[in-house]
């Protein structure tokens, strides 16, 4: 089953890395992209992704604010929003989960760890 995945990332290099990893591990995929917080909200409402990979430091509207906004809407409460962030200080993981993220992964991306992290979310039952 194909998953619709929204990648919210403003840094081109990070966007390319995540995209290439997903294209390697997924047979069928529908990748969507947003480069700022406002675009992330718009894309989520328009396309209703199955998974959202969310950078937390975004222009216009932070990822923190986007997550809080989306999780208030009953349509997206069960949509996994996975923080993909350089925020790696003590307490950042807890802050991301409190904001509504379902899981948390830090950059820079280690490919093997990232693939292992994503696998449960890519299963058909998730």
Image (cartoon, rainbow, N blue to C red):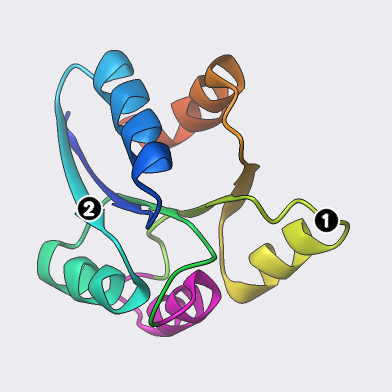
Q: Is residue 123 above or below residue 94?
A: above
Q: For the residue labelled by badge 1, is the local secondary structure a helix, a strand or a loop?
A: loop
Q: Is residue 122 above or below residue 32?
A: above
- Residue at position x 35%, y 83% from top? 73
Would you say residue 96 is visible in this rendering?
A: yes
What residue range appears in magenta?
Answer: 61-76
The count of marks equals: 2
Q: Earlier in the sequence, mark 1 or mark 2?
A: 2
Image quadrant where residue 77 sits: bottom left
Q: Position of residue 70 (x, y in %)?
A: 39, 77
Q: Position of residue 87 (x, y in %)?
A: 69, 56
Q: Which residue is mark 2?
A: 33
Give neighbour class at mark 2: few <14, some 14-19, many 20+ (Cα, 10 Å): some
Pick whichever, 9 or 92, lies toward us. 9
- Residue at position x 61%, y 74% from top? 99
Quadrant location of the N terminus in the rendered image? top left
Q: Position of residue 109 (x, y in %)?
A: 57, 30
Would you say residue 126 is visible in this rendering?
A: no
Quadrant location of the C terminus in the rendered image? top left
- Residue at position x 28%, y 75% from top? 41
Inspect the magenta stretch and tell me whether residue 73 lies in it: yes
**In this picture, residue 46 sits left or right of residue 78:** left
Q: How far apart in space, not on screen, are marks 1 and 2 (Cα)?
A: 27 Å
Q: Position of residue 39 (x, y in %)?
A: 24, 72
Q: Which residue is mark 1?
A: 89
Inspect the magenta stretch and tell me whether residue 124 lies in it: no
Q: Is residue 108 above or below residue 79?
A: above
């Amino acid at each position: 089953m194909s998953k619709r995945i929204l990648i919210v990332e403003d840094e081109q290099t990070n966007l390319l890395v995540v995209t290439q990893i997903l294209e390697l591990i997924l047979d069928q995929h529908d990748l969507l992209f947003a480069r700022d917080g406002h675009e992330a909200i718009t894309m989520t409402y328009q396309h209703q992704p199955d998974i959202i990979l969310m950078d937390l430091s975004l222009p216009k509207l932070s990822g923190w604010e986007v997550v809080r906004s989306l999780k208030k809407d009953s349509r997206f409460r069960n949509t996994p929003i996975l923080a993909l962030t350089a925020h790696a200080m003590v307490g950042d993981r807890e802050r991301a989960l409190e904001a509504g993220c379902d899981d948390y992964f830090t950059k820079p991306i280690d490919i093997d760890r990232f693939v292992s992290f994503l696998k449960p979310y890519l299963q058909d039952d998730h």
